[in-house]
Image (spheres, rainbow, N blue to C red):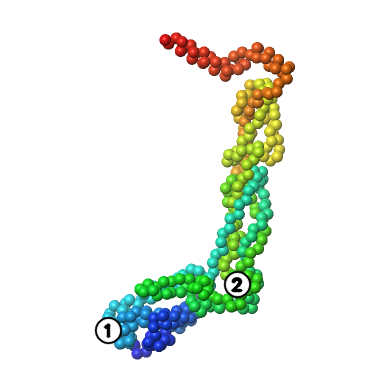
Amino acid sequence: MSTTKRCYYETLEVERGADESTLKSAFRKLAMKWHPDRNPGDASSEVRFKEINEAYEVLKDGDKRAAYDRYGHAAFEQGMGGGGPGFGAGFASSFSDIFEDLFGMAGQRGRGSGRERGADLRYNMEITLEDAYKGKTAQIEIPVSVTCDPCSGTGAKAGTKPKTCATCGGAGRVRQAQGFFTLERTCPSCQGRGQTIEDPCPSCSGSGRVTKERNLSVNIPQGVEDGTRIRLAGEGEAGVRGGPPGDLYIFLSLAPHDIFQRDGADLHCRVPISMVTAALGGEFEVPTIERGKTKVKVPSGTQTGRRFRIAGKGMPVLRSRQVGDMYVQVAVETPQNLTKKQQELLAEFEKLSSGATQPEAAGFFSMVKDFFGSRTSTP
Ligand SMILES: [Zn+2]
Ligand SMILES: [Zn+2]
């Protein structure tokens, strides 16, 4: 049995006296070459790959290597002296460890091809209240990096192909022994791509991406609010080397409006009315958000600050058929710059005034009277 097994040094294609770093680079090169993912459907490569791992597991360990040098494969068979019985059992676990270390990272990133998802982009857009009311299609221009056409994102000049990186064997990462530790870092030759480009594409200088002004129409639905975020899937930066693109997020902010203040779906506005309209009652017109007009009727004796509700003249609610209301608050304006005639008329009006014409004032002054009355009666 052990006699048919290939010599570990032969398996790794190194001399018997090979040092640690020679072993390691030989292992890395062969492991990449015979990795089952790179040789799909080839059962013999899987066997080869396991042999390579087994050989390296033994030879990288000083004790195991010494035992192997002395006893050969027999050192690791159950019941034999030399290496002891623990070795055989230990292989399975350390095998999977190294498998994870070497290929786990590369696997996540697309098996050493350096594929990366493109970055998400944020675009800030200010819209008017009217836009939020009606909804609109906005045309925007954004500088985005997109996949380079001539090289289809590979970064290699048309007609050429990227080569597997010789330093890392395509893994994108290299391992370095430092004392007892093995450090893994991004491959310096290929910056983690696992591939090197000898003839870079002239349009993108080998990056696989170019910056373009892209025109997009963004559909802004009715009822959006300040801070509403619209996601355009796949409209962000192009992926790196064939990776999927990122998303584009439109962050909406609402410009303040001259007439209306928004409170959720409701709109508020404040309208000054004359003292006479407030006293006699009447009708006045107010603008509405859809650029129309509506009439507000005020009864006689309307006080300042009173609110009138106009149903259905507010904002639409996002993704629903509901519509808010509009509230009109009146502010009674005290007349200014009166003519002589107006002053006389008001003075005459004042003479005719009583508690009934100004109920609030009458109530207040009677309280004041009571207040002083109670004070004088105390001492
Ligand atoms: Zn590399
Ligand atoms: Zn290109």
Q: Which residue is rendered at x = 63% and y = 32% of the image?
A: 270
What quarter of the picture does the N terminus occupy?
A: bottom left
Q: Does the numbered disc 2 mark a residue whose Cβ is under 8 Å from ligand 2? A: yes
User: Depth check: 72 or 337 in front?
Assistant: 337
- Residue 145's image quarter? bottom right
Type of the residue with mark 1:
Gly
Residue density around tag 2, few if under 14, some if 14–19, many if 20 or more, within 10 Å: many
Mark 1 lies on residue: 82
Alpha carbon separation for disc pair 2 and 1: 54 Å
Residue density around tag 1, few if under 14, some if 14–19, many if 20 or more, within 10 Å: some
Mark 2 lies on residue: 206
Q: Is mark 2 on a helix, strand or loop?
A: loop
Q: In this view, does 319 lie above or below 22?
A: above
Comes first in the chain, label 2 or label 1: 1
What quarter of the picture does the C terminus occupy?
A: top left
Q: In this view, does 261 lie above or below 368?
A: below
